[in-house]
Image: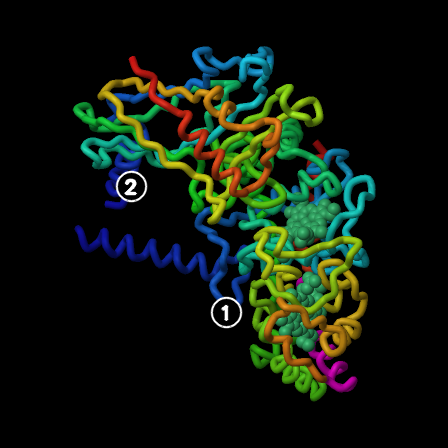
Amino acid sequence: MKKTYKLIFISLFFINTSGFAQTNTLKINITPTFGAMVLQLADSLFNANDSTQLQVDVLKFYISKVQLLNDGKIVLEEKNSYHLIDASELKSVLLPIENKENIHFDELQFDLGLDSTTNVSGAMGGDLDPTKGMYWTWQSGFINFKLEGKSKLCKTRNSEFQFHLGGYQQPNYCIQTLRFQITNSNVINLKLDLKKILQQIDLAKTNHIMSPCLEAVLLSKIVANSLTVIEN
Amino acid sequence: MKRKLLILSLISLTIVAFRFIDNPLIVLPKIFPKPVYDFSKNPLSENKIKLGRALFYDPILSRNNMISCASCHSQFSAFTHVDHALSHGIEDKIGFRNSTTLMNLAWQSSFMRDGAINHLDMQALAPISNPVEMDESMIHVVSKLQSNQLYTKLFYKAFGDSVITGEHTLKAISQFMLTLVSCNSKYDSVMRKQTSFTEQENNGYKLFKKNCASCHNEPLFTNDEFRNNGLSLDTSLNDYGRYRVTKNPSDSLKFKVPTLRNIEFSYPYMHDGRFKKLSQVMNHYTNEVIKSKYLSPELDKSIVLSSNEKVDIIAFLLTLTDKSFLFNPQYFYPKEIFLESAKD
């Protein structure tokens, strides 16, 4: 008697976790660019505002709560949806589409950054692990978006700029929800254009944001607007 | 058939519930409220606590492998840095604040005197990366632990995985800290009707309830809130407390109301350790409270106490001493764990 139940439980467990029913995967690529060029970290200098040279050393950010919609209704919601996008080791976001070979969708939605619940939930693993360097140590909270580099415009030590954007409490809540029109396909390509971001920042004045503040919220909006779908 | 299943699941549910309430790994005293810490996200186990205890006492968490958590949090002083007004860290660098006691942390909703840390799990990151405390990085700590045989063994036993992660490191440290429960003082015995206060203690208790318990309320002796208790600003530190976190002027000079359990041994007192003796604390509350705009309203009306009454309150405060906590061998430096590793 007992044994049968155990067996049923075990087999149920496997069906749930083994991806047995998974037939398809949706791939989301986010490519950091600088205008028309694909971004190369550290070793190259870009011509930003014509006259100024600039180098990007670190670009890391979180996307979370990935969803697909059709006609404004959610048709797929990724569970435990946290992804750290790191320009130094780009990976696609893989969205398993279980049991839904015939799924139809016309929009992709996700959050740039992490919500306040995630920010107060203690230690977590995977992309949220504290060794990822995306957590403030002296005051709790995740860094949603990290951009570090050098520009001649910055009158700072080694001409460095550092933007660590985050904050999970109003009025400094930085999370941005993004929605894109897409076509029903297995691959979605997005780009984050750093040129667009840096053209909207006066690097001579703003080159150092390291804690939750209104400027960080403003910049998070600029970043969000610089993430777009690459048309096929 | 269905019924059997129902009964089976009911039984297993009660087992789970019972386990939580009567978890032998940590005492949840009946008179304490419901803990704030969500144990379901980090279920206690003997091996995780053991690992956490090793990490707490191991200077491997610091850059020069010389400072451990216990360097600033020693058991016999209820896990504060005894006799140091401001804590000392790596290469004897002096910190910004007086170290806090560590006890009954499962009932606390934020950490640090200004509440800068929002979850017990994340607390260890602060001292580990503070340049005047342990001056390390979490990623380097994890790689040091990974190349240490003792720890790959302990992590495997605790988490079933010898690949060490930041998450597991922090959760294990939390587990040990969660076991630091103090609930066996004379006060507790009196509440359990196992003994009674002396006349003096009883008088002190009454005065305490009248003058102090609005902030230091029973049974934890803190309301877990931030208050301005009328201390003058030390201009050599310019520590505005809670304001540093919220940037809200009304939080100026507010600090976390600390527990008063084991207060006899956790001197010096206040965020900057300005008072060495309880009698000085008493004199502060009666004579030295600074009536600023943001002074906590409970202190608007001056506290008036005769010198005998002050002595009575102190006598009561001494009943909060919990020797079974201060000398609990389960919290000692874990010689046996480190020796085990030296042997092989």
Give the residue displayed 32% in from the left and 26% down from the top.
A95
Q: Is residue A231 left or right of residue A167?
A: left
Does residue A189 lie above or below A214 as drawn? Answer: above
Give the residue displayed 46% in from the left and 19% down from the top.
A32
* In front of the other: A138 or B74: A138
Q: For mark 1, what is the residue?
A: B30
Residue A77 placed where, x, y %?
Answer: 29, 35
- The extreme bottom residue here reads B199
- Name which quarter of the figure residue A18 lies in: top left
* In front of the other: B76 or B302: B302
Q: Would residue B105 be counted in the magenta stretch?
A: no
Residue B266 placed where, x, y %?
Answer: 74, 63
Check disc 2 and give the amino acid type. Lys
- Name which quarter of the figure residue A20 lies in: top left
Please tell me the numbered disc located at residue A7: none
Q: Would residue B314 be counted in the magenta stretch?
A: yes
Give the residue displayed 19% in from the left and 26% down from the top.
A103
Which portion, as a residue range, is magenta?
B305-325
Tag 2: Cα neighbours inside 10 Å, few (<14), some, or many (≥20)? few
Q: For mark 2, what is the residue?
A: A6
Q: Is residue B253 left or right of residue A1?
A: right
